[in-house]
Image: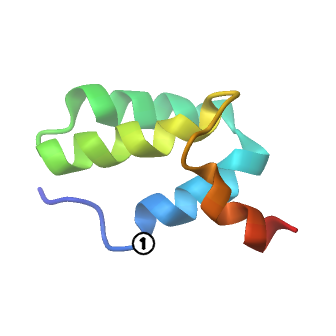
């Protein structure tokens, strides 16, 4: 198994910030805890940050959302 394809984290961040589907969050949590590739675990943790009230890396997406 390898890390996710390029752009996957960014796509999840952009869409899940607005949608925040609990099923996607659960899947990301499982991947962050159990994926055999450390890169995919790190990417899942990064994507999970969009579910936090204060998302420190979210300012980059404000341009696209407005």
Say which of 53 and 43 sits in front. 53
Q: In which quadrant will I find the N terminus?
A: bottom left
Say which of 66 and 5 sits in front. 66
The picture places residue 42, in percent across and down from the top left corner, at 26, 42
The picture places residue 62, in percent across and down from the top left corner, at 75, 62
Say which of 58 and 9 sits in front. 58
Please tell me which residue is depicted at 51% across the width and 28% down the height of the picture. 26
Using the rendered view, name the quadrant where residue 64 is placed: bottom right
Relative side of 11 to 9, left or right: right
The picture places residue 57, in percent across and down from the top left corner, at 54, 49
Please tell me which residue is depicted at 57% across the width and 41% down the height of the picture. 56
Relative side of 62 to 25, left or right: right
Task: State whether residue 35 is above or below residue 26.
Answer: below
Relative side of 9 to 17, left or right: left
Task: State whether residue 43 is above or below residue 20.
Answer: below
Label 1 packing within 10 angstroms: few (<14), some (14-19), many (20+): few
Count of residue discs: 1
Q: In which quadrant will I find the C terminus?
A: bottom right
Task: State whether residue 27 is above or below residue 63.
Answer: above
Q: Which residue is mark 1?
A: 7
The picture places residue 54, in percent across and down from the top left corner, at 66, 31
* Residue that protrudes farthest toward the right in the picture: 66
The image's colour scheme reads: rainbow
Please tell me which residue is depicted at 50% across the width and 64% down the height of the picture. 10
Please tell me which residue is depicted at 76% across the width and 71% down the height of the picture. 63
Q: Secondary structure at mark 1?
A: loop
Using the rendered view, name the quadrant where residue 61 is placed: bottom right
Task: State whether residue 22 is above or below residue 14.
Answer: above
């Amino acid at each position: 198994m390898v890390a996710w394809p390029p752009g996957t984290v960014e796509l999840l961040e952009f869409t899940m910030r607005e949608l925040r589907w609990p099923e996607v969050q659960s899947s990301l949590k499982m991947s962050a805890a159990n994926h055999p590739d450390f890169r995919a675990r790190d990417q899942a943790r990064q994507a999970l940050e969009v579910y936090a009230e204060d998302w420190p890396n979210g300012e980059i997406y404000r341009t696209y959302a407005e």
